[in-house]
Amino acid sequence: MDKIWLKNYQQGVPYEINPDSYASIPEIFDLSCQNYAKKIAYTNLGENLSYQKLQRHANNFASFLQSDCGVKKGDRVGIMMPNSLQYPICMFGALKTGAIIVNFNPLYTADEVSHQIKDSGIKVMVVMTNFANIVQESLKTTAVEYVIVTGFGDFMPWWKAIAMNFILKYLKKIVKPWHIAGAKLLPHVLTKGAKKTFQPVEIHNSDTAYIQYTGGTTGIAKGAMLTHRNMIANMEQANAWLKPVLTSDQELVVTALPLYHIFSLLANCLLFMKLGARNLLITNPRDIPGFISELAKYPFTAISGVNTLFNALLNNSKFVVLDFSYLRLTLGGGMAVQRSVAERWESITHNPLLEAYGLTESSPAVCISPMNLKHFNGSIGLPIPSAEVSIHDEEGVEVALGERGELWVRGPQVMKGYWNRPEDTAKVLTEDGWLKTGDIATVDDQGFVRIVDRVKDMIIVSGFNVYPNEIEDALAFHPGIKEVVVVGIPSNISGETVKAFIVPKDGVVLTKAEIMSFSREHLTGYKLPRQIEFRSSLPKSPVGKILRRVLRQEELSKMAEKQLQKKRL
């Protein structure tokens, strides 16, 4: 496909970036810590961490890993914690030793943690006390050599730390009892590391920096191997794209998505670190009142998130009266941004909600809306510098401009493969470097890319392709709907039928007849949700992405149970 998108690049944005501009992530980290030493790097739970202190703590952590854990280049270090000051300290420190970071979702079960430990071969595990009991359980079937445990109060004044630990353990009962033989406490680790001398490690940009797991939503979780070059390339791509609206050492970015998620890891943790920005880490974004209370304290200039997060904020009366005069960048990713949410966001904040698109396998960014786009246009934007896209049919043949097909991606940010899974790698990576995304998309004559849906989520009704995102986007405009998700369920008549799960806004009573009437005004016949179910909430991933697969599985289980009952009769 010709790079027709280049004609719509904002002035000053280069067509290509240099993915070899730095040798490693630690090189960028050390430069930023030197250039912005006195600036605040991270703020969390009322505590600040300067770039200077961040670098010192990271160096001490690296020294301990080398001297007391014997960590060498290529060893895997696992991190299992929510957004906190400890995360960047441990991550950057481990990277400096040449270790490979393996991020763990703190909400994983012991079985899920065990799988990831075994699959990646973790040598050292760093975990927040809140989740130490899960790691303890997983250690019964795994062989992690060293465990380092940290608590939320570790970087607080002693009196505040005592209060915090008491509240979490005894009042909220978040910290469950745990015992891990030989576990080290992070404050002691940093103190001991300060007495050692860090031995610099030669890191090449071709070395793996992260084994980032895909989450296992379509089967067993696979670890995408992301090199230093992959991540540096994506930092350079995103930096070139966002440069028109961002200023070095002048930004305060709100980080509500967890840093263990690839979107937040690259966009918030790494890119804004490179820019010398201040990162406001939100530990529990599901606590919307608490989240908004934090936002009210700071003149934030940028915020990233998923559609459900923005929607939840907009539905809170205290959010709409905040001061948005400093806000210059709102970036939505991780899932489709709904037009109704984007338009409300722009109306209230006077800042457009720009959509970005990426995958774990592409470090993650592929497309971002141009920074001079005044209003949401329903696309995921344009391919960023040095990135290529192409649309292919089921046989792998490139389709004509404007036609639907699977989105393929190529660029320096694309992973080198799945960890220890050559067969799975061969299924998604072509010999000439194209990554098959599994997303159905179109590209218009201006180069704007639009995601229609996931291949696996597509519903086929009487031979017609029905895309859940399209139906959800239409229904989301109903003034009484807070959240909506659509799935396809088997039908003897039409092959599949559309079912909508709807969460009404607080105090609103909806009826199926009302929803059907509204649907007929906006959707053609075969796209109508023939089944409607009202719920108080929808199943979501830790980053707030609505889980269609969970709802579909529930429906399939119900149908199987009905069939079983009929046989019994």
Image: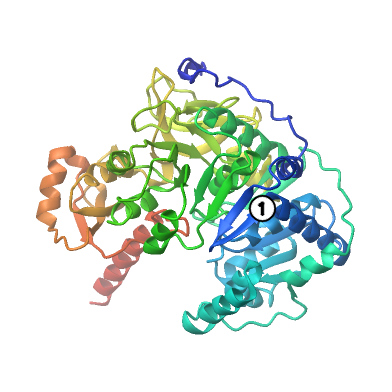
**Taking 148 as reference, is 448 left or right?**
left
Which amino acid type is marked by label 1? Ser
Can you see residue 415?
no
Task: Name the one closer to the observer, 269 or 56.
Answer: 56
Q: Is residue 446 above or below residue 473?
A: above
Quarter of the image where one finds residue 36: top right
**Crowding at mark 1 (Cα within 10 Å: few <14, some 14-19, many 20+):** some
Residue 30 percent across, percent down from the top left: 76, 44
Residue sticking out furthest to the front: 38
Q: Nearer the viewer, residue 246 or 135?
A: 246
Where does the image place residue 274, in percent across and percent down from the top left? Answer: 65, 40
Q: Quadrant of residue 145?
A: bottom right
- Which of the image's four quarters has the C terminus? bottom left
Horizontal and vertical percent for residue 293? 40, 60
Q: Residue at x 58, y 35 (%)?
A: 435
Residue 61 in the image, given as x and y percentages of width and height = 77, 60
Res. 358 in view:
yes
Q: Secondary structure beneath disc 1?
A: strand
Q: Which residue is mark 1?
A: 50
